[in-house]
Amino acid sequence: MERFKETAVVLSTLDYADADRLVTLFTRSHGKLTAFAVGARKSKRRFAGALQPFTLLRAQLVERRGDTFRLDAADVQETFHRIREDLPRIARALYCLELCRELVRDREPHPALFALLVEYLHLLDQRAAGPTSVIAFELGALAQAGLMPRFDQCALCGRPPGSEPRFDPDHGGAVCAGCCHRARGAIPVSAQLVRSMRAIQAGECLPLPAAERQKARELLNAFISHHLGRQLRSVAFMTQVGLD
Ligand SMILES: [Zn+2]
């Protein structure tokens, strides 16, 4: 049995048996892992509200045989309580947690993605995350997971995407008009949106107009669904609360 301490964000929790809770954590150095919090639902004091989605904590973990972990204690570092006061912010935070959970495999370290998530939770908490911020987070998270969609060149021929591009989730990015016949099901997009997505990938804090954000949402949903084999559940929740 190995004991260690880790900084972690709570991705999700699930009640287990009579009194336990299964907690999926995104840890800074060990990546994603799921740990048993034994008796977590009986002793409220022991974890004192620490096991809520998107809480940042310092976790005391024990690695057990058979690839499982036990969570012995958790010191809250940041509750991000202002996120919890506002439904759109909750929806964005839950979406980003689900995206991280689905993009990374168990025990695969992703310290840069972890840092990106914590930074985004701080921005949401400080009310400094505008409507385009989720798109910027997604593009950053996809790049960290090795799945960056291409907007700088046609994904099929490598030439500039041109004035009548489409977006093809199967081939991983924008395709030019000359290659559209090879990209069945590709989504028509404006050349402006392709330029904007490139700018966001390059780190420009670009507020997109609402219509472009909606189109960007459509592209990213299609791209992420293509790679994961299903749509993220929290997409529906974002739509419910009126977010694109
Ligand atoms: Zn092409």
Image: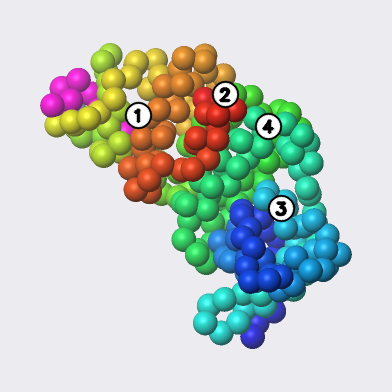
The residue that label 4 is drawn on is: 87
Residue 187: quarter of image: top left
In terms of depth relative to the viewer, which is nearer, 64 or 145? 64
| Label 1 CB less than 8 angstroms from ligand 1 | no
- Helix, strand or loop at disc 3? loop
Q: Which residue is mark 1?
A: 152
Give the x, y percent position of residue 111: 58, 55
Give how far across and how far down residue 208 sits, in percent. Answer: 52, 18
Of the image marks 2 and 3, the number of the one nearer the N terminus:
3
Q: At 62% from the left edge and 78% from the top edge, which residue is drawn?
A: 63
Say which amino acid is labelled 4. Answer: Leu
Q: Earlier in the sequence, mark 4 or mark 3?
A: 3
Identify the amino acid type marked 3: Gln
SS at badge 2: loop
The magenta segment: 173-181
Q: Quadrant of the N terminus?
A: bottom right
Q: Which mark is residue 242?
A: 2
Q: How is the image coloured?
A: rainbow
Q: In the displayed structure, would residue 177 be above or below residue 115? A: above
Magenta span includes 179: yes
- The alpha-carbon separation of the residues under discs 2 and 3 comes to 24 Å
Earlier residue among tags 3 and 1: 3
Position of 182 with respect to 52 (left or right) is left
